[in-house]
Image (spheres, grey):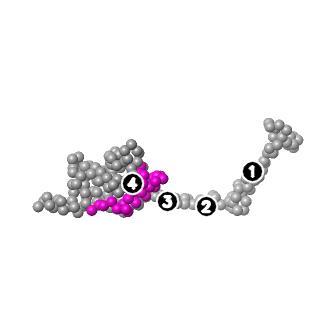
Amino acid sequence: MSASKGKQHGHDHDDCKVTDELIHHFEEFCTLAGSKDPKIMTTKASGKLVDDCLSDLKKYDAKAICDASVFPYCKEHGKPHMVVNKDNVDKFINKFAHEIAKRKTSNNKIDDKDPEVLAIKKTICNCITKEKPHVHEIKESATGNVKGLTDASKFTGTSKARFDKDGKGKGKEAHDYVPEDSGYVCGYKGQGTYDSSH
């Protein structure tokens, strides 16, 4: 009776299927980590995925497990990345759940179909599907006046003289003294300026 309960209990937790939505979430982390191809997951992308989505598993040192065991197991042979597809995402989640279960139960020989592993797998799937990558928004300075610093109509002194009313710079002509770039020989600049300076 208890064996059938265990199987039934395990079956309840084995409903984590790799969906298109789950794959899309993996791709979002690839893009955010700087990959030009959303199907290429690097260690940086997998680390961000763990940090942003699996904070509940941090007590088991989830990021270290990912870096040391899960990512190397799932990446392409001889390549520094994992290709994001249904098989690899499933492999990633299964390996991750199994490694976390080993830590959680202090049993390195726990079966990968154990109800504890399947429960963790379901948690991982739910967390990744629910969470989005955490993107830091750039907000205006709390001290204010950022717009004032870039508004040329509010400039004073020499800065005011170097911009026109539309805020465009006037270039070299706005400076008080622009040396003339002409002379008799290449080393002599400012033709006709000797007398005015003496």
Q: Is residue 165 left or right of residue 91?
A: right
Is disc 3 surrounded by few (<14), some (14 to 19) or many (20+) residues within 10 Å?
A: few
Q: Which residues are the magenta region?
A: 15-42
Would you name the residue on which mark 3 appears? 137
Q: Is residue 47 left or right of residue 196?
A: left
Asked if residue 128 lies in the magenta stretch, the reply is no
Q: Secondary structure at mark 1?
A: helix
Q: Are marks 3 and 2 in contact (CB under 8 Å)?
A: no
Q: How many angstroms separate mark 3 from mark 2 (CA)?
A: 18 Å
Is disc 4 surrounded by few (<14), some (14 to 19) or many (20+) residues within 10 Å?
A: many
Q: Secondary structure at mark 4?
A: loop
Q: Are marks 1 and 4 in contact (CB under 8 Å)?
A: no
Residue 117 image offset from top left, x and y in percent: 25, 55
The three-letter code of the residue at mark 1 reads: Lys
Q: Quadrant of residue 170?
A: bottom right
Q: How many angstroms separate mark 1 from mark 4 (CA)?
A: 54 Å
Counting residues from the start of the chain, the first of labels 1 and 4 encountered is 4
Counting residues from the start of the chain, the first of labels 1 and 3 encountered is 3
Would you name the residue on which mark 2 appears? 147
Residue 186 image offset from top left, x and y in percent: 80, 37
Q: Going 21% across and 47% down the picture, which residue do you hit? A: 109
- Labelled disc at residue 172: 1
Residue 10 image offset from top left, x and y in percent: 21, 59
